[in-house]
Amino acid sequence: MIALTKPIFNQDIIVVLLTVSFLLIAILRASYWKHAKLLFMGVFAQRYANQYLREENAFTERVSFITFLLMSINFSLIILKLIPETSVLETFSLIGVVMLFFIIKIGLILLLGSIFRLKDIAKLGIFFSFIFDRAFGFFLFPLVILLNFFAFNITPLVMLMVAILFVILLLLKLFWLWKIGTNAFGLSHFYIFLYLCTLEISPLLLLGKGVVY
């Protein structure tokens, strides 16, 4: 009766989520690696990102969808290590909140693009913003494995590695968005700065505050 009235954290759900995450990576590797590799390499060189965009088709759409699921799951697994034990329902609710966070961000960028009549730029902004988040979600997988199944408690060390990886990719994202916005589209530095503060930095601060407090 106590087990029914007092939901507790179930380690089995972590195994299930990691299995799903591994399955998504396996699908990328087996069927869509050509396009997935372009996506991940686009983090470090714009020519790969441009090539990925030029080859936009059903395969790239599937890669985008799979990597969206992958980053949502792996982000949620990291957050689960920072909050008190949760029930299975709360775990899936957290994944839903993470997905909703990304969806709202996409919606806001599209809304701004529609208001300022920059729909094409808004779509490119979504792509170049989320390419780093997708890569981060992919690279998180081995770290999540270490967090949950290493023989010793190395949570502080792994979290430090996660933070370092996050900061590196965030700086790359800000650099590329600034460079592309100014050089490729000739946007004002002020508007780019406003965009970065509003839709890139502020949501992260709010998310971090919500997780910590």
Image (cartoon, helix red, strand yellow):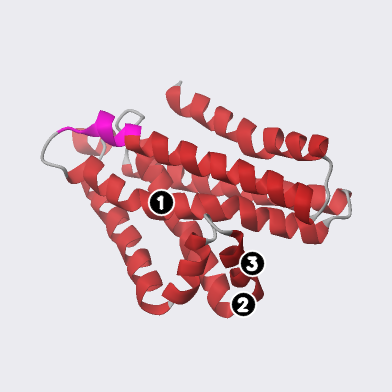
Residue 114 % position (x, y):
84, 54
Position above or below: 209 against 1: above
Q: Position of residue 18 (x, y in %)?
A: 29, 54
Q: Quadrant of residue 159?
A: top left
Residue highlighted by disc 2: 55
Q: Disc 3 vs disc 1: which is toward the camera? A: 3
C-alpha span from label 2 to label 1: 27 Å
Does residue 19 show up magenta in the picture? no
**One can see residue 7 in this view:** no
| Magenta span includes 156 | yes
Amino acid type for the residue under numbered disc 2: Glu
Pinpoint residue 115: horizontal percent, then vertical percent.
87, 49
Q: Secondary structure at mark 2?
A: loop
Q: Is 36 positioned to the left or the right of 19 in the image?
A: right
Closest to the camera, between mark 2 and mark 1, is 2
Task: Report which residue position mark 1 lands on.
Answer: 73
Three-letter code, disc 3 = Asn
> Which of marks 1 and 3 precedes in the sequence?
3
Check disc 1: other Cα within 10 Å, few if <14, some if 14-19, many if 20+.
many
Secondary structure found at label 1? helix
Task: Tell which circle, 2 or 1, labels the residue nearer the N-terminal end.
Answer: 2
Residue closer to the observer: 13 or 183: 183
Residue 50 is labelled as: 3
Q: CA distance from mark 3 to mark 1?
A: 27 Å
Is the residue under label 1 in contact with that under label 3 (CB below 8 Å)? no
C-alpha separation, residue under disc 2 versus residue under disc 3: 9 Å
